[in-house]
Image (cartoon, rainbow, N blue to C red):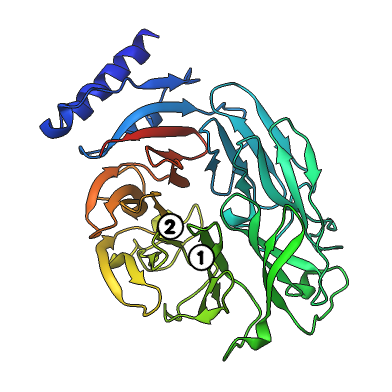
Amino acid sequence: MRFMLKLALIIVCFVLGSDFSYAALPPVAIEFVKCNWVNSTQLVAVPLDSGPLLLKSVHCLEPSTSRGLGSPQLSPDGNWLLLHGNYDEMWLTNIHKANARSFRDGALARLPEVGATSLVWAPDSRSVLGVKRETQRNGFSTGPLKPTLFSVDGSTQPLPEFTNLAGPLDELYWVGNTGLAVAAFGTRGDYYKQEHVDENPTIAIVDARNGKVIQAVALASLPDFPSKRIFVVNGRLDSRGRVHALIVFPRRWVEWNQGEAPRMVPLGEETSVRTQFALAPDGKHVLMMQGLSASGPICEIGSRGKCPPPTPRSGPIAELREISTGKIIWSIDGTAREFRNNNDPAISPDGRYALILIPAEPGAISTSMIALISMANGKVLQKINHYSKAFGFSSDGKVAWIADDAFVAKYVIRN
């Protein structure tokens, strides 16, 4: 306990002593929760420089908690963390108490690519919106997706199932957390035990809590459309609570505003399942990660001595683009000296700030670090010397957070 109090005092002094303008504000006491094991993870959560973010608390996850392979998600009330595995494993962990709820053995849909939008917290922070699917042991489907509510008490509740003439419900991407989603019918026939071809694959905006199709569009009706495969769907609810989504297909970007026809937008042809972006709250811009990484051969573990070092690459890290024209508003450039991964960026609800991953500086403890940037001009405001699997902002925009398999850190945002 004495060590933890001393560590907290050191961190407070480090943060408050780094910039007089922010030091003039009342200090925030740092809380350490369940941190009965000590290593550098508590220190790497501290921003390297002064700015809007001030570390408020560090919540260490239990060593027994199974490590999530997907992007963690903090609940709206900030008390629960969602961790999910490659396919059909999920854990809901209370970050204040030593308890977790697990869902395994086919509880989750074994989608070909499980993204962050396959699971999302409900507004009450007591349950998670997801999907189930019956599969064989080899992963092939034996039936359509089934929207499901997973509760923090360990129970599951089926939501109404969809029927559509275009085919079975094969994909579901949540938009917001009210139950609205972008769905795809008849697009994954080759992932079934009995392969089949659906002649009229269709995308739709749906209300999955009520089993209602709000708007449906056949993919064949989209102009110059060569593929039915969806790479990524990312969206948000507009001021009227309606879906606004960007859908990434091979070499195609489609913008869809609920109530309007989907339209192609000129955001580039370099698309993949790793395309990462976030819609700005104004609905007119998109923050896009460019996947900057070092180049060269990637060698297996154990062959380090025979493997040539990575070749550094310089270029854009992230860009803010106008959706309708593809125009670049600003760009953040840098140099990646190591192979590195990216996360989806996160934008604050008021559109002022964003959290992104940038290449680490020489001597850093990982290949990437977190940066708080200004959405007005792309200026880097603060850096955190840590690679985090996920980060985000509270719905009121007053708190930012970062999370990985070991801890969750929360920050007060000082305006």
Residue beneath the point at 27% across and 24% down: 11
Instruction: Give residue 10's quadrant in the image.
Output: top left
Residue 274: image tag: 1
Write the residue at 31% across / 18% down: 7
Q: Point out residue 118 in the picture as x, y percentages from the top left corner.
A: 64, 55
| Residue at image coords 34%, 61% | 309
Give the vertical position of 42 relative to 301 (above or below).
above
Which of pointers 2 and 1 lies earlier in the amino acid sequence? Answer: 1
Image quarter of the N terminus: top left
- Residue 194 seen by the camera: yes
* Identity, as a three-letter code, of the amino acid under mark 2: Asn
Q: Residue furthest front?
A: 240
- Residue linked to disc 2: 342
- Quadrant of the drawing holding the C terminus: top left
Q: CA distance from mark 2 to mark 1?
A: 9 Å
Residues tagged 2 and 1 counted as in contact (Cβ below 8 A): yes
Percent x, y of residue 289: 39, 64
Secondary-structure class at tag 2: loop
Q: Secondary structure at mark 1?
A: loop
Counting every numbered tag in the picture gives 2
User: Counting other residues with Cα less than 10 Å from the Cα at mark 2, is it few (<14), some (14-19), or many (20 or more)?
Assistant: many
